């Protein structure tokens, strides 16, 4: 919300200041109810609109089904993009306030930027990471060998000369490169096959490739048909989880900053809802994404996450990813990935996790499926 400094609007400025104080007090208490605003200021609050970028219909169906945002003291609008690159471009341009995409997308955008991003000019920042809830039994990003490949383990001898599908620029490509580095190999030691997630999944199912790396969501039919998960993301390097990223100008706007803090709190609550309400979450996935009940079961089980604040460990992981990809020549220049991270909402994330017993609830959820 932009304030216009003039005597004529002094009353409006005082009202906005009152609103911001009310928002701040409510947020500091981490109330699960709506932010309390003074009588007569409710309409003022509703003038703040946060535009949320999403890749396809990945957020809106379950966000709305959860009901978590129905009493939010600001408006939410969704902007839908066909892929993460267009989503990130819109976030960079300020056409959206907050987006959800993988950390690897931001790393590539920074490397491609001209002029280079600095601490002062970085157009957006990661504000919360959606970490894998169970990296042992429910790691989402994996490498899978086809039924007829004869590959049962991820070793240099097993994969040398094999057809390996990935999509340059996508998170599956990162996992492919990390796997090669882990094995001491280069793309020349295998047969790279460029396919997107959907095409790679079909090629895996029909034995047209020997290996794929990517989100397990796509490989359920192939795994059911005999394909084998031979490695998880954590086996070969830090993963690139998704998360919420916010436009820098939106973060610098006091009213939007307060609204985004509330959004982050509700996002943690939403992920708790998603983990604890499989029936409702799956119904939303089936309705909008046209999934079969079996596929919805599979996707839900692997898309439960643990929201995490930005800390030095996360930033170090981003630096490691950038170094690996640059080493393979997949980034045009070396970067300092720390520019695109902001830990201002860390207290909100940690306090909300504790307040709602998130980890205990997650443990119960993982025990069921």
Image (tube, rainbow, N blue to C red):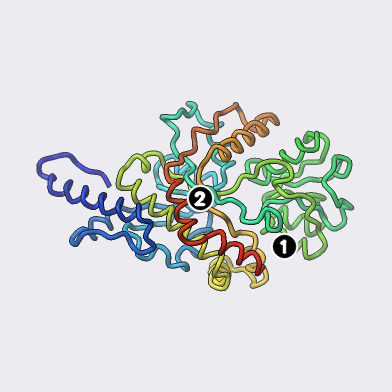
Element carrying mark 2: strand
Q: Which residue is mark 1?
A: 220
Instruction: Give the x, y percent position of residue 220.
Output: 72, 62
Residue beneath the point at 28% across and 60% down: 36
Across and down, in percent, residue 88 comes to 50, 43
For the C terminus, the image quarter is bottom right
* 316, above or below 60, in the image: above
In the rendered image, residue 101, in percent from the top left (x then y), is placed at 54, 48
Residue at 56%, 54% (x, y): give it.
306
Label 1 neighbour load within 10 Å: few <14, some 14-19, many 20+: some
Left of 42 or right of it: where is 137? right
* Horizontal side of residue 51 vs 188, given as left or right: left
Q: Position of residue 14 (x, y in %)?
A: 16, 47
CA–CA distance between discs 2 and 1?
A: 24 Å
The residue where tag 2 is placed is 100
- Vertically, is 348 above or below 187? below
């Amino acid at each position: 919300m932009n304030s216009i400094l003039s005597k004529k609007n002094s009353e409006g400025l005082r009202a906005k200041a009152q609103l911001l104080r009310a928002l701040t007090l409510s947020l500091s208490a981490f109330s699960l109810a709506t932010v309390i605003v003074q009588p007569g200021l409710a309409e003022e609050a509703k003038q703040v609109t946060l535009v949320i970028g999403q890749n396809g219909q990945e957020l809106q169906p379950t966000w709305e089904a959860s009901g978590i945002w129905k009493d939010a003291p600001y408006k939410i609008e969704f902007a839908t993009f066909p892929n993460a690159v267009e989503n990130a471009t819109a976030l960079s341009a300020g056409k959206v306030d907050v987006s959800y995409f993988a950390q690897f997308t931001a790393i590539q955008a920074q490397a491609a930027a001209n002029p280079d991003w600095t601490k002062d000019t970085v157009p957006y920042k990661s504000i919360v990471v959606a970490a894998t809830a169970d990296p042992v039994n429910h790691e989402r990003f994996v490498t899978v060998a086809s039924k007829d490949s004869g590959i049962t383990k991820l070793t240099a001898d097993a994969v040398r000369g094999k057809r390996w599908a990935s999509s340059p620029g996508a998170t599956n490509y990162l996992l492919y490169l990390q796997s090669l580095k882990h094995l001491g190999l280069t793309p020349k030691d295998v047969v790279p096959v460029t396919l997107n997630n959907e095409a790679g999944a079909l090629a895996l199912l029909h034995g047209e490739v020997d290996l794929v790396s990517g989100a397990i969501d796509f490989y359920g039919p192939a795994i059911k048909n005999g394909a084998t998960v031979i490695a998880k993301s954590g086996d070969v390097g830090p993963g690139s989880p998704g998360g919420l990223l916010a436009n820098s100008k939106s973060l610098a706007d006091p009213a939007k900053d307060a609204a985004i803090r509330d959004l982050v709190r509700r996002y943690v609550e939403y992920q708790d809802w998603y983990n604890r309400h499989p029936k409702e979450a799956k119904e939303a996935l089936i309705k909008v994404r046209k999934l079969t009940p079996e596929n919805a079961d599979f996707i839900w089980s692997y898309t439960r996450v643990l929201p995490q604040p930005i800390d030095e460990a996360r930033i170090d992981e981003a630096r490691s990813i950038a170094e690996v990809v640059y080493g393979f020549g997949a980034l045009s220049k070396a970067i300092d990935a720390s520019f695109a991270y902001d830990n201002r909402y860390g207290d909100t994330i940690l306090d909300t996790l504790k307040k709602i017993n998130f980890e205990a609830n997650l443990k119960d959820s993982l025990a069921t499926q």
